[in-house]
Image (cartoon, rainbow, N blue to C red):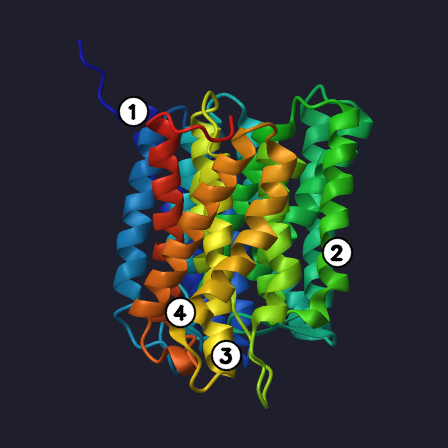
Amino acid sequence: MIQPPLSAQDFLWLPVPLLVLTGLGLSLWLLRRRLDLHPELLRKGMHIGTGLICLCLPLWFATPWPVLTLAGVALLALLGLRLLPADGQGLASVLHGVGRRSAGELYFPLSVVVLFLFSGDEVVFYLIPILVLTLADAVAALVGLRYGLSRYRAEEGYKSAEGSMAFFLVAFMATHVPLLLFTDMTRLDTLLLALIIGLLVMMLEAMAWRGLDNLFIPLGTWALLQTYHEANSAALIEVLVVTVLLIVVVMVWRRRTTLTDSSLFAAILVGYAAWAVGGLLWLLPPLALFLTYTGLVRFGHQRVTHDVRAVGAITGAGLICLLAQVLVPGESFYVAWVAAFAAQLAMIGIARIHGNTEHGHRGRIWAQATLQGWGIVVVPTTLLGSSGAEVWQYLLGGALLTGLAAGLFQHLQPQIENCPRDADRWWRQGLLGGLAALIAGILMFAGAPFWT
């Protein structure tokens, strides 16, 4: 006999979270009408209440179906709320009165569903990400609002160092205490893993925009728990040391870059991901690009800045290579990884040289930019990652792919003499880097003699 997706007990408990959240929203709306509360206080009050209710879901429901039902109802209600005016004293002002575009309230139920599905019987792996999202995110926002003095540039205005530090401390405690109480990890291991999660997820929150922190924080926390909960103390110490070193290197180099502060956090996370997947050899291409690209950027009279979109465009193809390496561990995607970053550095060179040269010869500019991308990224990684006669094959293949991406960018990019920093440029540059990586990957699977 086919069992219905919802049991009688599920039907009994389903109205509880819906009624509680509805009551919380109405209560906050009434407070808004009576008191002159900051919109962020109302939004975070709803955020905390929602998170605390979600913490109880494993107690009420044993299967994902009721959670999926709740998420569907919540999404419909939240989408309907978006149709109401957010200004003034309306009901929508509880969530949308902060004056910035955000879809965070829509991402929240999606994160809860994913965590409930993936955590399975490991309830603590569900509770910790929800705790971090519920408490650390809210405390960071409120501390930054009240005590934030040391501001840094984010994608949507500014955030504060005080808020980020508060996030780290709360995320650390929200991870450390449950691991200590509900797992068989040693005290030292819970301490180390909590420090790692606190640092990395703090940077995820700092780089997020338009409410994406409601996805990045819980899913990032879950991924780190899954990756390191069985690691020994020595491995966790190594992860923590590398993370701290990456932060130090990037912050020391901060004033020599064109990245916004939140984009610097994104760069650190890319470096961490590269090291976590492939070790030092995989870290070299993005690190070489980060340390040298500023010599290829034209500053002019005003210092240009690059945001998370630029970081995403430049590293996007590489991140796909990292994901492929994780999903297909029997294969090596290192050659595609190197090709992606060499191509990006060459395209940065194309934009810089054209910007500094009013009537330069296009062929000479292409050759110079190709040489820069090839020499800075391909040559050192080839010498370190291979040996023997194959070195020349790798160097030749890298030169061809780097030159191809640089030439296409030079030909396809409008206003190359004063290269814009708009979305079209970043899409174009990201796709061309992806093309270089794709060709490298095809050659690899076709049997070309690349790195293994």
Kindly report the distance in space between the C-alpha atoms of the residues bearing marks 3 and 1: 41 Å
Q: Is residue 450 visible?
A: yes
Q: Identify which amino acid the numbered label 2 is placed on.
A: Val
In the image shown, does 103 or 48 lie closer to the viewer?
Answer: 103
Q: Which of marks 4 and 1 is nearer the N terminus?
A: 1
Q: Earlier in the sequence, mark 4 or mark 2?
A: 2
- Mark in the foreground, 1 or 2: 2
Q: Is mark 4 on a helix, strand or loop?
A: helix
In the image shown, does 448 or 216 lie closer to the viewer?
Answer: 448
Q: Identify which amino acid the numbered label 1 is placed on.
A: Ala
- Mark in the foreground, 4 or 1: 4
- Farthest residue, direction bottom: 301
* Rendered view: 63 above or below 279: above
Kindly report the distance in space between the C-alpha atoms of the residues bearing marks 1 and 2: 57 Å
Query: Which residue is identified by label 2?
Result: 249
Query: Which residue is identified by label 3?
Result: 34
- Mark in the foreground, 4 or 2: 4
Q: What element carries label 1?
A: helix
Q: Residue 22: horizontal and vertical position, in percent?
A: 38, 55
Q: Which of marks 1 and 2 is nearer the N terminus?
A: 1
Q: Identify which amino acid the numbered label 3 is placed on.
A: Arg
Query: Which residue is identified by label 1?
Result: 8
* Rendered view: 321 above or below 140: above
Query: Which residue is identified by label 4?
Result: 363
Q: What element carries label 3?
A: helix
Q: Residue 341: horizontal and vertical position, in percent?
A: 50, 51
Quadrant position of the N terminus in the picture: top left
Q: In which quarter of the image is residue 383?
A: top right
- Mark in the foreground, 4 or 3: 4
Q: Residue 389: horizontal and vertical position, in percent?
A: 55, 29
